[in-house]
């Protein structure tokens, strides 16, 4: 095994122990090993010292540091189209993180003032491009293809790709997420990553796993490649990562702390990409971390920067942009416009609209619609964007709304348009009219649409009220009898013009008192002589809680009978004028003994007890029952009790 291969096998990495789901990194022990290699320690210390000296007083760079990227998938089984999508997403994540325009940077802005008042984040001038031009020979890539290879490299080094920042994507196993050298050389080396945490796209049978699914494993590893150490360096509160604005901590931080954590003397900077937190809780580089990385790139990766000029199409086009000004189409029609103002790039510029060449930087006389505008400069840098030209919506003014009186159809709506153009008017989608006044309207909601012949359309809503002095009160009484409908609705009117007519369920009546009503919905209507009308639906229910006084039923109990078999008054029989249920009769002698009982109201007593005839005497009775039957059984009625005489 050669020395370079040995270095890449032992270089810094993140690992994921299965039991706890936390990142770990073997960089410290790997670095100790590398420092023991012949000549390595002296060269490394010189390189670090030069960066330390220059980074302290470094000014913000005024030109982008373009880093060309090549991505090599090795024995993953991931198809090319998916591999490209994953690679593009990873480069986009790196650019957002290093450029400090990541979507969650606001989380830092919210936390920083109170928790880290002396620390500032920094957007770097480092930009990554997925190379598309002048590829190394022998890898089957054509001009314009992304520098993404499948099973064309092995291990973590390929000299053919010197001058690139290489990403080697392969199954690492053992819970390892990724690794990188501490200070890459751009000689065919790079950072290695497991496909389960590479980029943010799941496809081709590969799933990017949370909580490491935002591409920040590579952000961390590329930080190492640009000579950033962990904030805890070799561990302990006396450690030094050579970054002045990262507070000292004695150990890594995991998960998502959310609040202040102090392990030495100051709150640790757990959101930095160089910590071990979940992807969602890593969202910034500090200003001194950025200065250190930019310094390292300029001092040690000149070959990578030079390669960008020939392999990154984007490099020649950095700074080329186009501002767009859209003028909407007026109500007069066909006067919309799109103006294009390029900046950067190389003149002359070519302008197109929907693929058709324009004579200048403006497209005029446009109708409303969606257009694709494009600009290409003399160097072939291309820009395009989809723009929408809208038509101005006319201002429709509601001039007048008049209500109708008592449903007499006297309502009125009038609208006008604040435009010096002729318009047509339509009410609720009806025929077009040259005037905006609509009369003879009944109460209700209306929409007036206005239209100019050129197609300019607007609308306004209005409500016509139906006003009336007629006041109607409705009282109701639910059905309370088990055996007869006795519901009631009583309608009383005020401020009506006599005579007043009433109707219930479509049947006219001379009075508003309606009785003998069944349960259900009843339609009530009132109309006075002025044409003012009232209509409502009243629902009557059933309340069997107590028998109403208007329930015309009773139970008859005889006071005497003569069981002499003469055909007249020979038996004791209870009779009810309405259906009863749950009936029970008990007859007692003077000593309180039950001599007869029955649950059948049709059953009679002829004065016998156990095959013996009773003698003339006074007997007592108790009767319990419910009014009604089947589904209209009410609550139990009041028990009946009394005495009667048997005469022989």
Image (cartoon, grey):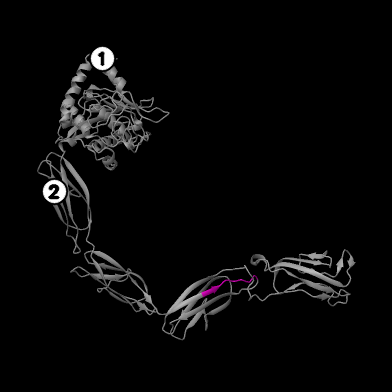
Q: Can residue 149 be seen in this view?
A: no
Q: Which mark is residue 341?
A: 2
Secondary structure type for disc 2? strand
Residue most extreme to the top: 38
Identify the mark nearer the N-term, 1 or 2. 1
Q: Which of 325 and 635 is in front in this view?
A: 635
Image-based side of 76 in relation to 456, left or right: right
Residue at 50% from the left image edge and 75% from the top image edge: 474
Q: Is residue 264 visible from the viewing direction of this image?
A: yes
Residue 478: in magenta span: yes
Between the C-alphas of marks 1 and 2, the distance is 57 Å
In what quadrant of the picture does the C terminus appear? Answer: bottom right
Q: Mark 1 points at which residue?
A: 37
Which quarter of the picture shows residue 481? Answer: bottom right
Image quadrant in which you'd find residue 287:
top left
Compared across the picture, whether 520 is left or right of 360 comes to: right
Q: Is residue 122 magenta?
A: no
Residue 198 at what x, y percent from top left? 32, 32
Instruction: Give the residues drawn in magenta, as a range.
Output: 475-482
Q: Main secondary structure of the magenta part?
A: loop
- Where residue 292 appears, as percent x and y from the top left, is 20, 29
Across and down, in percent, residue 146 comes to 24, 33
């Amino acid at each position: 095994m050669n020395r370079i291969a040995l270095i890449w096998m032992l270089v810094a990495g993140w690992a994921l122990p299965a039991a706890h789901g936390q990142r770990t990194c073997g960089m410290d022990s790997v670095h100790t090993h590398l420092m023991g290699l012949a000549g390595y320690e002296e060269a490394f210390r010189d390189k670090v010292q030069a960066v330390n000296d220059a980074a302290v007083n470094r000014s913000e760079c005024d030109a982008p540091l373009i880093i060309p990227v090549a991505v090599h998938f090795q024995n993953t089984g991931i198809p090319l189209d998916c591999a490209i999508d994953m690679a593009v997403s990873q480069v986009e994540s790196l650019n957002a993180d290093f450029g400090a325009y990541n979507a969650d940077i606001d989380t830092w802005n919210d936390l920083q003032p109170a928790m880290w008042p002396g620390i500032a984040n920094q957007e770097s001038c480092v930009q990554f491009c997925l190379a598309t031009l002048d590829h190394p020979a022998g890898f089957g890539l054509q001009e314009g293809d992304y520098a993404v290879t499948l099973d064309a490299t092995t291990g973590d080094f390929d000299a053919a790709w010197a001058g690139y920042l290489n990403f080697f994507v392969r199954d690492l196993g053992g819970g390892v997420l990724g690794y990188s050298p501490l200070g890459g050389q751009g000689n065919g080396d790079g950072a290695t990553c497991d496909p389960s945490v590479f980029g943010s796209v799941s496809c081709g049978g590969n799933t990017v796993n949370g909580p490491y699914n935002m591409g920040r494993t590579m952000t961390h590893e590329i930080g190492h490649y640009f000579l950033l150490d962990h904030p805890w360096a070799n561990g302990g509160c006396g450690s030094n990562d050579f970054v002045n604005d990262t507070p000292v901590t004695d150990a890594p931080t995991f998960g998502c702390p959310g609040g202040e954590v102090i392990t030495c003397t100051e709150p640790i900077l757990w959101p930095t990409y160089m910590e071990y937190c979940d992807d969602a809780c890593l969202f910034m580089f500090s200003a001194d971390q950025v200065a250190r990385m930019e310094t390292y790139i300029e001092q040690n990766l000149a070959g990578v920067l030079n390669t960008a000029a020939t392999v990154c199409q984007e490099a020649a086009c950095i700074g080329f942009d186009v501002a767009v000004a859209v003028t909407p189409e007026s109500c007069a029609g066909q006067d919309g416009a799109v103006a294009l103002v390029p900046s950067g790039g190389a003149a002359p510029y070519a302008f197109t609209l929907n693929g058709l060449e324009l004579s200048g930087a403006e497209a005029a006389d446009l109708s409303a619609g969606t257009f694709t505008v494009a600009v290409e400069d003399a160097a072939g840098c291309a820009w395009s964007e989809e723009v929408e030209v809208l038509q101005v919506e006319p201002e429709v003014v509601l001039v007048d709304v008049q209500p109708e009186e008592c449903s007499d159809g006297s309502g009125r709506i009038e609208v006008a348009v604040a435009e010096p153009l002729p318009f047509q008017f339509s009410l609720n989608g009806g025929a077009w009219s040259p005037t905006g006044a609509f009369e003879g309207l009944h109460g209700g909601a209306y929409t007036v649409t206005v239209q100019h012949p050129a197609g300019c359309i607007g609308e306004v809503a209005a409500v016509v009220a139906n006003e009336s002095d007629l006041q109607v009160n409705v009282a109701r009484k639910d059905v309370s009898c088990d055996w007869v409908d006795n519901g009631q609705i009583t309608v009383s009117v005020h401020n009506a013009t006599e005579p007043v007519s009433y109707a219930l369920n479509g049947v006219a009546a001379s009075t508003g008192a309606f009785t003998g009503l069944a349960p259900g919905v009843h339609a009530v209507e009132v109309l006075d002589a002025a044409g003012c009308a009232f209509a409502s639906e009243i629902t009557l229910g059933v309340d069997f809680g107590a028998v109403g006084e208007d329930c015309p039923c009773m139970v008859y109990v005889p006071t005497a009978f003569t069981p002499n078999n003469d055909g007249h008054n020979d038996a004791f029989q209870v009779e009810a004028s309405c259906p009863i249920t749950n009936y029970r009769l008990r007859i007692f002698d003077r000593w309180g003994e039950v001599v007869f009982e029955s649950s059948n109201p049709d059953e009679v007593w002829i004065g016998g007890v156990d095959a013996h005839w009773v003698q003339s005497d006074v007997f007592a009775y108790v009767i319990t029952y419910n009014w009604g039957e089947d589904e209209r059984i009410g609550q139990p009625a009041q028990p009946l009790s009394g005495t009667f005489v048997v005469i022989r």
